[in-house]
Image (tube, coloured by chain):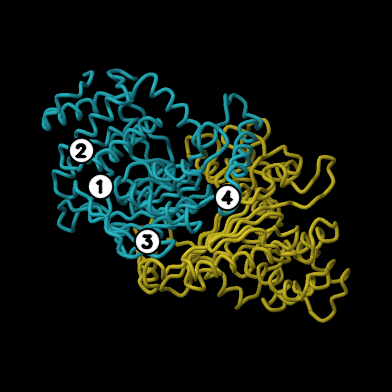
Chain colours: A cyan, B yellow
Amino acid sequence: MNEGVVYVPVETLREFMYQVFVKSGVPPEDAEICADVLITSDIRGIPSHGVNRLKMYYDRIKQGILSPTTRFEVVKETPTTAVVDGHHGMGHVIGYKSMKLAMRKAKEYGMGAVAVRNSSHYGIAGYYALMAAKEGMIGLSFTNARPSVAPTFSVEPMLGTNPIAFACPTDEEFPFCFDAATSITQRGKIEVLARLGKPTPKGWVISRKGELATDTEAILKGIPKGEYALLPLGGAGEEMGGHKGYGLSVMIEILCAALQNGAFLKDLSGFDEAGNPRPHQLGHFFMAIDIEHFVPLEDFKRTAGAILRALRAAEKAPGAERIYTAGEKAYLATKRAYEQGIPVNESVQRDLKVLRDELGITDVELPF
Amino acid sequence: MNEGVVYVPVETLREFMYQVFVKSGVPPEDAEICADVLITSDIRGIPSHGVNRLKMYYDRIKQGILSPTTRFEVVKETPTTAVVDGHHGMGHVIGYKSMKLAMRKAKEYGMGAVAVRNSSHYGIAGYYALMAAKEGMIGLSFTNARPSVAPTFSVEPMLGTNPIAFACPTDEEFPFCFDAATSITQRGKIEVLARLGKPTPKGWVISRKGELATDTEAILKGIPKGEYALLPLGGAGEEMGGHKGYGLSVMIEILCAALQNGAFLKDLSGFDEAGNPRPHQLGHFFMAIDIEHFVPLEDFKRTAGAILRALRAAEKAPGAERIYTAGEKAYLATKRAYEQGIPVNESVQRDLKVLRDELGITDVELPF
């Protein structure tokens, strides 16, 4: 099942991605940010948002729908808030600078929030939340995304996977970091099932006819045509709380669009009405809360840590090996990544070879 | 199925609740708040958190674990943040005053947040979020609660139903208001099934043995003994995203406890180690975001409204009558409540008669 996977050292992969961005026209200091966001995803064990997306960014830059240089314009600012226009630049750079801005405001005033318009795919939402956690703050990061999720009682892809990320420091070796789509799953996980030749679990996806679909190949072919939609956390209908996942997703759509007068829902598809590619016009919302404005940081960390330790020590379900808390698997994955390298599958290897050859990257040696 | 239900006019029920609170020692201006929070729940079609809880508050005041007079102490304050000690007073009053404080800060500085310790059951989380929405702000309201929900891969009730409420104004007749427990369901809904003699849907509840329980009577008897636990949004295990509901719940536990150095998890049970009742020591977290600090309020309302209208107009699943957005069912319920009155079932009627007789309420005429 891991046939053909090659493990690449973290720093090799980071340097390769950095060079791809630079040779695509991204300024060096911005390319460092882009490469860091992507490698952080791989390091934390989230292969769906890391190096596997490198060629997607490259293709979008070539298509002209993603600007390699990022004009970060603060269009409105108050002591605690700002609205930023990213002018279709690199989402990672826009996200990084926006979160830095929110953090500066929070350090001084207790709280800071930044709403962003005209951005692009910014990688893992958790990256920006973690920036705040590292500085003794609570970080929150939200983004909308191209339509793929059906509202409750609908079969039409309307909402993005609209993730919510929350991170905070604890007294443990790693921060608490919750980072999840408000849909049950996202397309990347279905692509993994396709590579393994496995069916899609019933309840993840609904067909346009209203059936819970499980045919992985058919789903992947049909998603771009709108023939299938992902389901919100809680699933189809209301019995298992699907309206809650749906409601959370709408909350995020509002935070990410209405606070910056921006595009939303179908207008985030990346295509114009004639079917031509265009910028995705994504919106983000970042928030930082300075803990010391409430309680001494050490007290907060101790309480947060005690909550997490109590949860892990709860009675396990029969057959369960371990109870995790959010951020713990990423911590374990980080250790593994530095020991073993980042697993790169054959499909991604092919992408990277194309990039290496097209961009003439000769001084980073990929082991394939 | 609605056998014995009597519809009581909204203002009759509000006045009755007000008098119960006043005669229990709650100061008149506080009693108005308590009655308003409870009646708002009934009006919005959430019978689990309205008049049916009236006797619970009364019993707790009599037991001495809930103080009818509320000492609202601001123990720390900055321009955008505050920490409040509620000294085991009425959760509704503490919530109302805390949200007002957050809103004052947001109006002036753009954002405001208040963390609360030593509070008690504050009714529907959405009430406080709606306070902000009525004033042109985004409101967020979170609370922890007595342990009833099992972490992913656990069978032990550790977390509360830990709701998240978010409300904002729109250009429609009613605000967007998302207000939901981070568990699939809560005990009140299982009590409704018991009255109807129906089984509990498989997946809502896990037994201590790790089985998905459906025997409604057994579940209700076993919950107080810790023999059953509610499951987080997404259900048991990780396949349907149960770790996401779990993670959201932990996020809320941290926001509500760690920012105010307070109690958490099992310490919120309402019992000491010897099994004697004691204050619940709940924590809340409130946030207000002033929209005008980002964009003109009318622009925000128009965008939010457009998002909601587009969602409702999405293609319906076969057999589905209607696609709702959060707050819409409550709006429809509000109209019904003022037309028909609030439905009061036989069990609640019995409670209200006890209160009427014990407290000697003679000038509010209940129709039973």
**Distance (Cα) linking label 3 and label 1:** 19 Å
Cα separation between marks 4 and 1: 32 Å
| Same-subunit check for callouts 3 and 4 | no
- Which amino acid is tagged 4? Leu
Q: Which mark is residue A82?
A: 3
Horizontal and vertical percent position of residue A212:
40, 42
The local secondary structure at tag 2 comes to helix
Q: Secondary structure at mark 3?
A: strand
Q: Which residue is mark 4?
A: B255
Q: Quadrant of residue B23?
A: bottom right
What residue is rendered at 48% in x and 68% in y?
B137
Characterize the local packing of mark 4: few (<14), some (14-19) or many (20 or more) Cα atoms within 10 angstroms. Answer: many
Alpha-carbon span between mark 2 and mark 3:
28 Å
Q: Which residue is drawn at the image coordinates 65% and 32% (left, top)?
A: A314
Q: Which residue is mark 1?
A: A90
Amino acid tagged 3: Ala
Q: Is residue B170 above or below residue A308?
A: below
Residue B292: horizontal and vertical position, in percent?
41, 70
Q: Amino acid at mark 2?
A: Phe
Q: Say whether mark 1 and mark 3 are on the same chain.
A: yes
